[in-house]
């Protein structure tokens, strides 16, 4: 049996401990004094003659004595490292006392114990206690519930969670989890642009691409790629743009862009087909005898309208003219292609529907009293706006005008139609929202000061560009103006074109700039194009964009800027 330690060990108490005993320690050094070796005597044997331990606690008095002795015990160095098998003296008695106290008494004892501990001992307590409150509840849940919990995290937090441990990474990389994140953010297959393409293909009877799951990380990879593309649009240095020249000093009057194919029409009587990837002119479409003022493209089919009063149908792959469509008696100023049928509007005040596969004129819509300036066709109904201040809704199959929408007091220049709402923009500075079923005017949107030259409607959100140099965002359900894109970075001249791409509004202007705006906040993001000749004649006439590319038709009417196309690439996979 180990011997007991004589009371001379009391001298090893530090000054703080002795102060608590009420002693004057003066300037005594707090260093621990040497401890005498333990002395063993026969009286120290804890066993009595009967062979039982005599220090077991049998009465309250004995408990009190042990408590006092425990408080007065000297800090000593034991020759054996304490362990469960070899605990410090009277450890069991001390714990027995502690367990006999009330909850409040235990808390008080713990507070006093912590106060008397050294920092290293407090840190040890933390290392022992903290794991008791750290439970990997995610790993304890069934996988379905764990994924449900993680589905409430933002993608950024999901990426952090994946670094926790191997199992969390497996959960955080779950393909269906990231599919839901893509759906929430409108990314990839779920983007607004993709959904419009799918609806168009469905109307035309073409197969709609289905979701293809090729690997467990596919949806995560799609999301991360889209995130990188967004960062390229917002912040990262612009890559050098491709410059496409080919129309000499003529005006580019119309522009189409789809599947890395660009088609530009000009008042030089030609259209040109370009590769957005290489920047090369693939072919020039010759045949019109007047300037080309309108065009549409679907797949490899191009339709163009000209001042020569004809439409032409072209094969973009070969450059061959498949059909020449005769019938209009004046300039073909606008058109809309849908379901292999194109509806054209002319300065002869009529509209015509054509079959692009056969070249036949299917229907003629007569009713406007002046030039038709804009037209929309959704496969069922035709909506037209004209210089007679009228907007008309037509049933093309019956060649019947269903509604004549009266209200504008000047020429109608722009239209949007989503199957439910008709939105018209006029030189009278107003924008009107009409109900397609009843023909009634639901809202008159006031706020612009001049001609509304371009609009885009998406999910009840209308974006309008005006010659007063401002862009406005409206709710067509309520008629409320939500945002005005202006301020210190606003355009300095008329807005010529605009387009919505995911979270952005892209606008171009006569001031020679192309600007990027956040559609949710209306905040100016940055200039994507700023011509050196801007303000002295340089103009951006048209823009067309995909999710990763922007095509701008630029030039001037006074020779200060060469006519050309600029192609900017924001793809995440393209090396800088």
Image (spheres, helix red, strand yellow):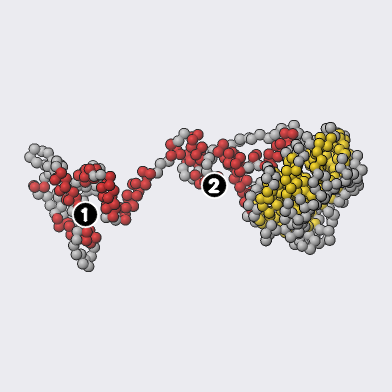
Check disc 1 and report the residue beneath it.
Answer: 75
Q: Is the residue under label 1 in contact with that under label 2 (CB below 8 Å)? A: no
From this viewpoint, is residue 217 visible? Answer: no
Q: Locate residue 320, reporting x and y percent.
A: 85, 40
Q: Residues within 10 Å of mark 1 (few under 14, many from 20)?
A: some
Q: Is residue 30 above or below residue 360?
A: below
Q: Nearer the viewer, residue 101 or 342?
A: 101
Q: Is residue 34 above or below residue 145?
A: below
Check disc 2 and report the residue beneath it.
Answer: 156
Question: How far apart are labels 2 and 1 at the CA level?
Answer: 52 Å
Q: Locate residue 312, reporting x and y percent.
A: 86, 41
Lower sequence index among marks 2 and 1: 1
Residue at image coords 68%, 43%: 477
Determine which quarter of the picture holds residue 330: top right
| Left or right: where 395 falls relative to 231 | right
Q: Locate residue 299, reporting x and y percent.
A: 77, 39
Determine which quarter of the picture holds residue 367: top right
Residue at image coords 83%, 32%: 397
């Amino acid at each position: 049996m180990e011997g007991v330690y004589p009371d001379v060990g009391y001298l090893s108490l530090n000054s703080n401990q002795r102060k608590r005993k009420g002693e004057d320690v003066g300037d005594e050094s707090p260093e621990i004094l040497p401890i005498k070796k333990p002395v063993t005597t026969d009286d120290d044997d804890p066993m009595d003659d009967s062979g039982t331990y005599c220090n077991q606690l049998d009465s309250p008095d004995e408990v009190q004595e042990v408590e006092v002795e425990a408080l007065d015990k000297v800090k000593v160095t034991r020759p054996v490292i304490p362990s469960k098998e070899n605990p410090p003296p009277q450890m069991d008695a001390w714990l027995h006392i502690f367990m006999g106290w009330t909850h409040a008494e235990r808390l008080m004892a713990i507070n006093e114990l912590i106060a008397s501990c050294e920092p290293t001992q407090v840190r040890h307590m933390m290392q022992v206690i903290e794991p008791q409150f750290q439970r990997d509840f995610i790993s304890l849940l069934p996988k379905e519930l764990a994924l449900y919990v993680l589905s409430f995290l933002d993608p950024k937090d999901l990426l952090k969670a994946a670094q926790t441990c191997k199992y969390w990474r497996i959960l955080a990389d779950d393909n269906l989890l990231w599919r839901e994140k893509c759906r929430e953010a409108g990314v990839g297959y779920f983007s607004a642009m993709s959904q419009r393409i799918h609806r168009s293909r469905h109307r035309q009877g073409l197969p709609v691409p289905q979701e293809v799951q090729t690997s467990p990380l596919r949806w995560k990879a799609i999301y991360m790629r889209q995130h990188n593309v967004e960062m390229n649009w917002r912040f990262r240095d612009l890559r050098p743009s491709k410059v496409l020249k080919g129309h000499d000093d003529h005006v580019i009057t119309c522009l189409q862009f789809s599947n890395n194919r660009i088609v530009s029409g000009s008042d030089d009587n030609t259209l040109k087909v370009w590769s957005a990837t290489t920047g090369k002119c693939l072919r020039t479409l010759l045949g019109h005898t007047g300037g080309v003022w309108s065009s549409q493209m679907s797949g490899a089919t191009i339709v163009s309208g000209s001042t020569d009063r004809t439409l032409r149908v072209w094969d973009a792959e070969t450059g061959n003219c498949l059909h020449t469509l005769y019938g209009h008696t004046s300039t073909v100023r606008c058109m809309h292609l849908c379901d292999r049928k194109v509806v054209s509007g002319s300065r002869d005040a009529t509209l015509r529907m054509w079959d692009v596969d056969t070249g036949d004129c299917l229907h003629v819509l007569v009713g406007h009293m002046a030039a038709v300036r804009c037209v929309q066709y959704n496969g069922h109904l035709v909506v037209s706006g004209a210089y007679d201040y009228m907007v008309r809704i037509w049933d093309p199959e019956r060649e019947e005008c269903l509604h004549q929408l009266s209200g504008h007091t000047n020429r109608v220049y722009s239209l949007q139609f989503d199957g439910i709402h008709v939105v018209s923009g006029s030189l009278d500075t107003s924008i009107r929202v009409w109900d397609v079923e009843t023909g009634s005017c639901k809202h008159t949107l006031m706020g612009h000061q001049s001609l509304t030259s371009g609009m885009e409607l998406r999910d009840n959100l209308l974006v309008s560009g005006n010659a007063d140099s401002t862009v406005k965002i409206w709710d067509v359900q309520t008629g409320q103006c939500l945002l005005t894109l202006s301020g210190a970075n606003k355009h300095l001249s008329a807005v010529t074109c605009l387009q919505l791409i995911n979270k952005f509004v892209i606008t171009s202007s006569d001031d020679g700039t192309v600007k990027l705006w956040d559609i949710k906040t209306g905040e100016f993001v940055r200039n994507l194009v700023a011509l050196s000749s801007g303000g002295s004649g340089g103009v951006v006439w048209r823009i067309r964009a995909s999710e990763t590319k922007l095509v701008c038709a630029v030039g001037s009417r006074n020779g200060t800027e060469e006519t050309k196309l600029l192609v900017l690439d924001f793809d995440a996979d393209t090396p800088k």
